[in-house]
């Protein structure tokens, strides 16, 4: 495979056949003819003339550009639609083609054509061919930027069939110039090392490739799942134990608060007629509300003789019965029932 420089725009147009990519075109029934076929590999495409033909993101970007000129391309016979080839020189318009196809690029795999429709000539003559040859436009670095045609070829084509000079039209040249100018910066200036170093906190200017690789490998290490699980389990056990301790502490505080409510109720002369189970079911606030609603039923003042106020006696003082009662109680009868003066 060789490449010729196009004088109109500086492009190289090459015809490239993939080794080992024979296709089955033996079916006479157009419904059984292949619809999707690979024509170039992703990355480098080796060839006998050692010319660089590289498929990458430039072709992807070009195909996605709204001004890309080769949306529907011919699948021709021996590149008879490609100016500069022997088949082109030996034929005349209207030149026969086998089919019309679209082109797409699958990253990591290569360039594929999808047949939109087979022509009658293609159905009739496809069985006479077994190879595909891509008519590719490359830039000065050998990177494919366009695919204007693909040719059906026979295995072991004659020497000199593997190159062509394709004089692009002014409109096509302008379109490709615009596409490559808009995509080259995006593709070529993307510095992966700088991006990775920035993410890792490294200086791209001083860090070696080995340093970056080692740092990236360290950052991508998976954590020890077993140790992490054990740590999480241990933490969960500690939290459970702490929750139990907190629960016990809260229960003790609640019990203390309830006892304080009951003690205040007795001091206020209120009788709480609730058994222990009933008190246990109430909160301290509910128990306090119950006590607040109770009436005072227990006298709080002393009722002993020593604390009793003397009743008003008669003019003569206590009678015999009163005197006997007072003496039996150990109290002076005259102090209880003094004589009125």
Image (cartoon, grey):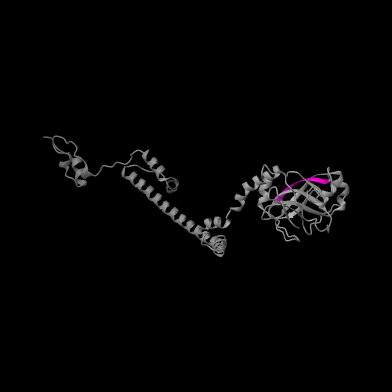
Is residue 294 or residue 47 the one in the foreground? 47
The image shows residue 159 at horizontal and vertical percentages of: 81, 59
Residue occupying image coordinates x 87% and y 44%: 120
- 225, 247: nearer the viewer: 225
- The foreground one among 201 and 139 is 139
Q: Is residue 203 left or right of residue 175?
A: left
Q: Is residue 98 magenta?
A: yes
Identify the image quadrant of the N terminus. Answer: bottom right
Give coordinates of residue 95: x percent, y percent.
83, 45
Horizontal side, residue 266 vs residue 91: left or right? left
Spot occupied by residue 73 in the image (x, y as percentages of width and height): 76, 45
Residue ID at (87%, 52%): 127
Residue 149, percent across and down?
77, 48
- Indicate the quadrant where residue 116 lies: top right
* Direction from residue 182 to residue 249 in the image, left or right: left
Secondary structure mostly taken by the magenta-highlighted segment of the chain: strand
**Residue 115, above or below 131:** above
Residues rendered magenta in the picture:
97-105
Quadrant (top left, top right, bottom left, bottom right) of the C terminus = top left
How many marks can you see? Answer: 0
> Does the stretch in magenta take in 83?
no
Residue shown at the point (37%, 41%) measured from the top left: 291
In the foreground, 123 or 200: 123
Q: In the current view of this chain or complex, which residue is farthest to the left?
A: 341
């Amino acid at each position: 495979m060789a490449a010729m420089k196009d004088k109109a725009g500086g492009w190289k147009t090459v015809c490239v056949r993939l080794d080992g990519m024979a296709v089955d075109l033996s079916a006479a029934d157009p419904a059984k003819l292949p619809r999707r076929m690979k024509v170039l590999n992703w990355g480098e495409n080796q060839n006998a003339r050692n010319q660089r033909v590289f498929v990458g993101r430039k072709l992807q970007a070009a195909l996605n550009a709204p001004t890309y000129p080769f949306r529907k391309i011919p699948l021709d016979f021996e590149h008879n639609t490609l100016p500069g080839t022997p088949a082109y020189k030996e034929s005349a318009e209207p030149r026969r083609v086998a089919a019309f196809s679209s082109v797409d690029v699958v990253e990591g795999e290569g360039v594929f054509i999808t047949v939109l429709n087979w022509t009658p000539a293609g159905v009739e003559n496809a069985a006479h061919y077994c190879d595909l040859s891509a008519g590719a436009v490359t830039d000065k670095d050998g990177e494919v930027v366009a695919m204007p045609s693909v040719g059906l070829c026979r295995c072991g084509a004659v020497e000199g069939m593997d190159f062509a000079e394709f004089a692009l039209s002014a409109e096509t040249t302008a379109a490709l110039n615009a596409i490559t100018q808009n995509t080259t910066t995006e593709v070529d200036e993307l510095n992966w090392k700088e991006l990775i170093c920035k993410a890792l906190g490294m200086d791209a200017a001083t860090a070696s490739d080995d340093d970056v690789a080692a740092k990236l490998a360290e950052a991508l290490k998976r954590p020890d799942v077993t140790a992490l699980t054990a740590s999480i389990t241990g933490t969960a056990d500690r939290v459970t134990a702490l929750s139990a301790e907190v629960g016990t502490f809260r229960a003790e505080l609640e019990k203390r608060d309830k006892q304080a409510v009951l003690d205040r109720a007795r001091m206020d002369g209120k009788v709480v007629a609730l058994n222990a189970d009933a008190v246990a079911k109430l909160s301290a606030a509910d128990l306090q509300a119950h006590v607040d609603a109770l009436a005072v039923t227990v006298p709080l003042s002393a009722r002993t003789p020593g604390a009793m106020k003397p009743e008003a006696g008669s003019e003569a003082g206590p009678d015999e019965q009163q005197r006997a009662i007072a003496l039996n109680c150990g109290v002076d009868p005259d102090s209880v029932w003094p004589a009125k003066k």
